[in-house]
């Protein structure tokens, strides 16, 4: 089979783990599979780089030298433990040194001009993947496998210039990825592609958005017509809930693309919201597996949609860092086009709406957006809508979260909403807003963040989700 295997930051966080990843790749390759690997930055490095970019902007000179030295030391240590061939290690170390030098120069520039732009931030943050790929490639070469590493841009991922959330230009990206990666595969060279990163058609580095390495993997999969995309991580698969919140969460053996997308959009597994889109469009199955338990069956995501008889709810998610905005005024009811105007204003400002609900009796519309765009949204709405007499007030509430239940059939099965409400009410939690999910595979409620744990525990229990 032709397989794309993506390894997340935790899977390559230490030298020992990277060695294990190389062993896994070697094993599947010796079984006759053709493999393209995609790798994330070492666990925590993306976050650290974002912090360094912000701090350098304050002109903090000594800090950046210490930061780069510590980053280099961590990568040298991982490389030293990941590969045993001294010559390969020497070459890898040289590469790591060269790149950390380059990073120091970029941070110095930022410290001088005291400004980090979305464009320079992408260059800085791309070093996470630029430093992890040579280590995995070295670990493979050290085992006698012919491997080479590429940035996303070098592999063929070409994007628009929307730095921080760049969109791949599929029309050029797919043929480029296909051309470059297939010719490496034809020469029996295993490509190690840096996840998350791309470049504009002018060659400027971009990133796809947080959790973007999974997106890179499915883009590669669609481009080379892979048989499957395997996403290796640190849990046994996609689970009924975030295992850090509900330890009894169970692994979901199989799921449809629509259900998985609904889960991801509402916060499961920190994946990029569009991460499954290329695989879904090309009908390429996606497996989620655990590097620390490779024999486990994992989760298989396919286009097959199965409504479960026992209970349509298969999983639940929680999205934090969101806010509810409510627009009230007489113009909301009975005046055609007011809602359209609201959404037009938000759309024009690039603000993504996660959930909408309208209350006729109270003459208001509420919607949920990310906290990070709250101020921008409220300002834009006030400027465009207040003063005409139709809208009385734009108010907002943060410190809330969206708790969703997901599963094919949730929409059509009577009683799901009632069960969600009574489970939540039994713990004394007040529901502030309710709406059908974006793809009709789910149902979401907004509760205060302080109540989220009680709400999640109650719903997980009500639908007996610990028995996946
Ligand atoms: P990676 O580094 O492999 O990309 P991430 O940290 O991005 O891994 O995502 C894996 C983590 O997502 C898991 O360790 C788990 O704690 C968390 N997670 C949250 N919700 C879910 C879920 N429903 N199923 C599986 N994992 C989840
Ligand atoms: N390293 C990037 C991030 O932390 C991409 C990824 O891990 O998927 O967001
Ligand atoms: Mg991730």
Image (cartoon, grey):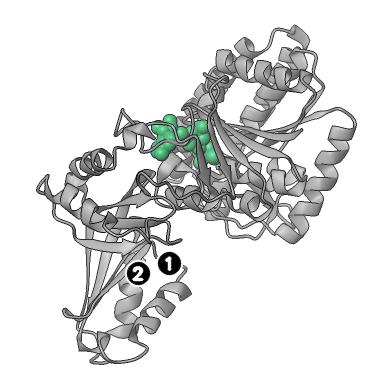
The residue shown at (11%, 46%) is 426
179 over 45 or under it: above or below: below
The picture quadrant for ligand 1 comes to top left
The secondary structure type at the circle numbered 2 is helix
Q: Position of residue 213 (x, y in %)?
A: 59, 41
Q: Position of residue 441 (x, y in %)?
A: 42, 56
Residues tagged 1 and 2 counted as in contact (Cβ below 8 A) = yes
Residue picked out by circle 2: 377
The image quadrant that residue 369 belongs to is bottom left
The residue shown at (49%, 34%) is 253
Relative to the observer, which residue lies in front, 457 or 112? Answer: 457
Is 186 left or right of 414, judged from the image as shown? right
Q: Position of residue 260 (x, y in %)?
A: 49, 47
Q: Position of residue 351 (x, y in %)?
A: 43, 67
Relative to the observer, which residue lies in front, 393 or 258? Answer: 258
- Residue 180 shows which numbered tag? none
Residue picked out by circle 1: 351
Is any atom of residue 125 visible in this view? Answer: yes
The secondary structure type at the circle numbered 1 is loop
Relative to the observer, which residue lies in front, 57 or 441? Answer: 441
448 over 92 or under it: above or below: below
Q: Where's the C terminus, which quadrant?
A: top left
């Amino acid at each position: 089979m032709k397989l794309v295997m993506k390894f997340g930051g935790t899977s390559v966080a230490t030298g020992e783990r990277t060695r294990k990843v190389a062993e896994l790749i070697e094993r599947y390759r010796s079984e006759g599979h053709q493999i393209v690997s995609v790798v994330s930055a070492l666990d925590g490095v993306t976050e650290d780089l974002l912090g360094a970019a912000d701090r350098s902007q304050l002109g903090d000179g000594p800090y950046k030298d210490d930061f780069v030295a510590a980053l280099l030391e961590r990568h040298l240590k991982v490389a030293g433990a990941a590969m045993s061939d001294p010559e390969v290690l020497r070459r890898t170390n040289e590469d790591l040194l060269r790149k950390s030098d380059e990073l120091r120069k970029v941070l110095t520039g930022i410290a001088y001009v005291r400004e980090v732009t979305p464009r320079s931030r992408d260059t800085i943050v791309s070093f996470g993947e630029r430093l992890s790929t040579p280590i995995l490639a070295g670990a493979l070469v050290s085992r006698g496998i012919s491997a080479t590493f590429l940035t996303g841009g070098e592999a063929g991922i070409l994007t628009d210039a929307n730095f921080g959330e760049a969109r791949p230009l599929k029309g050029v990206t797919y043929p480029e990825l296909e051309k470059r990666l297939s010719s490496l595969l034809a020469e029996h060279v295993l490509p190690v592609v840096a996840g998350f990163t791309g470049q504009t058609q002018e060659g400027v580095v971009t990133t796809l958005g947080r959790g973007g390495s999974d997106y890179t993997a499915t883009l590669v999969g669609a481009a080379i017509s892979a048989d499957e995309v395997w996403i290796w991580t640190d849990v046994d698969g996609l689970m009924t809930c975030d295992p850090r919140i509900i330890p009894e969460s169970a692994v979901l053996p199989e799921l449809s693309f629509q259900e998985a997308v609904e889960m991801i959009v509402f916060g499961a597994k920190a994946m990029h919201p569009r991460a499954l889109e290329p695989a879904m469009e090309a009908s390429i199955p996606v497996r989620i597996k655990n590097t620390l338990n490779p024999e486990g069956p994992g989760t298989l995501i396919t286009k097959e949609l199965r409504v479960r008889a026992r209970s349509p709810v298969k999983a639940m998610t929680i999205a934090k860092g969101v806010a509810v905005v409510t627009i009230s005024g007489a113009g909301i009811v009975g005046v055609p086009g007011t809602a359209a105007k609201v959404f037009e204003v938000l759309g024009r400002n690039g603000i993504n709406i996660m959930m909408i609900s309208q209350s006729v009796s109270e003459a208001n519309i509420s919607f949920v957006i990310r906290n990070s765009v709250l101020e921008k949204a409220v300002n834009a709405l006030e400027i465009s809508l207040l003063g005409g007499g139709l809208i009385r007030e734009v108010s907002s509430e943060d410190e809330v979260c969206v708790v969703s239940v997901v599963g094919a059939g949730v929409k059509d099965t009577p009683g799901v909403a009632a069960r969600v409400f009574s489970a939540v009410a039994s713990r004394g939690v007040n529901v502030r807003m309710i709406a059908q999910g974006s793809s009709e595979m789910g149902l979401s409620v907004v509760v205060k963040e302080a109540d989220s744990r009680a709400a999640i525990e109650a719903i997980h229990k009500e639908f007996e989700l610990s028995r996946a």
